[in-house]
Image (cartoon, coloured by chain):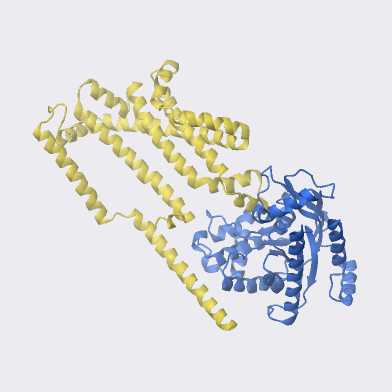
Amino acid sequence: MLHMALIETSYINNTNNNNSQQESQEQKKQESLDFIPVVHVKDIYKSFDYKNNKNNSSSSSSTTNHNHVSRQQQQQPLKNPRTSLSTSSHEVLNGVDLKIRKGEFVTIVGPSGCGKSTLLNIIAGLDRPDSGSVLVRGAVASSDASSTKRIMIFQEGALFPWLNVQDNVEFGLKITKMPKETGHRVADKYIEMVGLSKFSESFVYQLSGGMKQRVAIARALAIEPEVLLMDEPFASLDVQTRDLLHEELVGIHKTTGKTILFVTHNINEAILLGDRIIVLSSVLKNIKKEFRIDLPRPRDPESPKLYEIKKQILREFEGDLQIAKRR
Amino acid sequence: MLKEDNNDNENATTSTAAGIVAGKSSGRSGASKRYRLDITDVANVVLFLAVFVGLWQLLSILEVWPKTLFPSPAAVAISIGELIANNSLAIGIGTTLWRLTAGFAISIAMGGIVGLAMVKFQGFGKTMSSFAVGLLTFPSIAWVPFSILLIGFNDFGILFVVIMASVFSVMISTYSAVRNVPPIYIRASKNMGAHGFALFRHVMIPAATPSLIMGIRQAWSFAWHALIGAEMLITTLYGLGHILAVGREFNDMSQIIAVMITVFVIGLLFDRIIFLRLEEKVRFRWGLNQHAE
């Protein structure tokens, strides 16, 4: 019963998520005119089977909530026929629907275990949904070759230690068989964009954490992705470096006009960067609320509007926590 | 407040930048220093050799054992000179190294291919790895009778023993090195569009290289042990092991010691010059030496 009620409220939230009606009308008009989303996540369901150790993605985030979730499942069998009902499986995403427009900077925020990394992995084609699909420019994206256009930046950077900075940035171009000289030029351009021209010959271990993430950003941009997927890319950095990288990322977004989908558990980060903030709920396993922020960047986290939004997001999290406790 | 933070921040980045440039150059020079001969190092080696030869000379003067059984360093030096003069040492070294290269190359090729097949086909990998571990501990010299009867007293018989001694080490290390490639590299490169052979060639192999080199180094030492043993037992006309066996038959202790020294030096040269440098180079590139220093 409770479950059903929750889903209903979530739909209400989804439709009423705009701050003012005028805005929503305007948006709808725009949608009807030129709206083929760059990425359209369509009704994604995903659950993980704990007996098969198949999924190592997002394991860190899902294990933390595993206890209370499994209890919840024992009391209340899942209503969705599409998800498997074995006791060892655990639902992560329950019918997530999301459209991202070209050039949009979308941040997804949620507590650990809400499935945000899983969602990103599915969009990247690194993980398969149980049902539902990911459309890129209106076409169903395969998990393989065309995945070049949805480039992921991992928390750890995932740079290759056997290559220097230049070769790391050129990696994706080499894989797509771009001529060497063109690849060189493209890589130079993006290495310069992230301000590491001096370090193009350095090896990975010689770089600081912030520099590593900059190389990862350059490596992703060099492939000219349709959408940049960032999975808590700055989570392991110190505050100053993170602030600096926020600034740089905003600059890069401005100059390249790339579509960016940015996952984080840090509310401040989400509201400082995003045009649109999507709040994922670990109880609903779905999008709970959406905020649109029109403030110019760089933004002041102390500004009243951001503060208000931050408070609202926190309230949503708290609501989840209360429900989780009651179960 | 915020401004100050930013300033600090900038200072921090420039200073880390400078640190990295400095670290880089010092790292490079450190690496080249490692290969340059250090005077104290040379002095230590010379001193060690002097003491060793001195003790040896002392024992031979005291005549604890008869002179024929325990020759003086000078006698061994003369013996080395004779072996060089009549060309048998050069031919012996040439033959032995040829056998080593051929056997080891075949081992690497076969072990590498089977090791990769073990990664590809999981069931085969599981059974084969326990089988290979069993054969890895199997004493290589125990292959000799089998090889003599099956193949005979010739080069191929020796090669067979060398291959059997080292192929399983290559196999196991390929298998485990490729299997232990961090999944994050594979996920990242797949996301960038790598798959099939490109994934293998540009990600799996380089990522596995440090442990592969260690495995190959171990395989080389197995091959070397087996080769000298096999040369002594499977008598052909040439090879260092053969000269050793001849020395034993003619009771020529100084020839035996001369060959032992040659074997020692070859082993040392291979290990120090080829494998250590290769490993150092890879470790330096990956930054794996950071912890050791």
**Between residues B102 and A317, which one lies in front from this camera angle?**
A317
Q: Which chain is blue?
A: A
**Where is A166 relative to A307, above or below?**
above
**Between residues B246 and A85, which one lies in front from this camera angle?**
A85
Residue A15 placed where, x, y %?
Answer: 87, 67
Indicate left or right for A94 with A157 as reference. Answer: right
Q: In percent of the image, x 49 and y 70: which residue is there?
A: B17
**Where is B180 relative to A316, above or below?**
above
| Corner quadrant of residue A317 | bottom right
Residue A246 placed where, x, y %?
Answer: 64, 72
Image quadrant holding the C terminus of chain A, namely bottom right
Could one spot residue A25 in this view of the protein?
Answer: yes
Name the residue furthest front: A326
Q: In percent of the image, x 57 and y 42: which residue is there?
A: B179
**Where is A24 relative to A142, above or below?**
below
**Where is A182 relative to B237, above or below?**
below
Indicate left or right for B103 with A187 as reference. Answer: left
Residue A252 placed where, x, y %?
Answer: 67, 70
Image quadrant holding the N terminus of chain A, namely bottom right
Residue A312 placed where, x, y %?
Answer: 76, 73
Identify the hue of chain B.
yellow
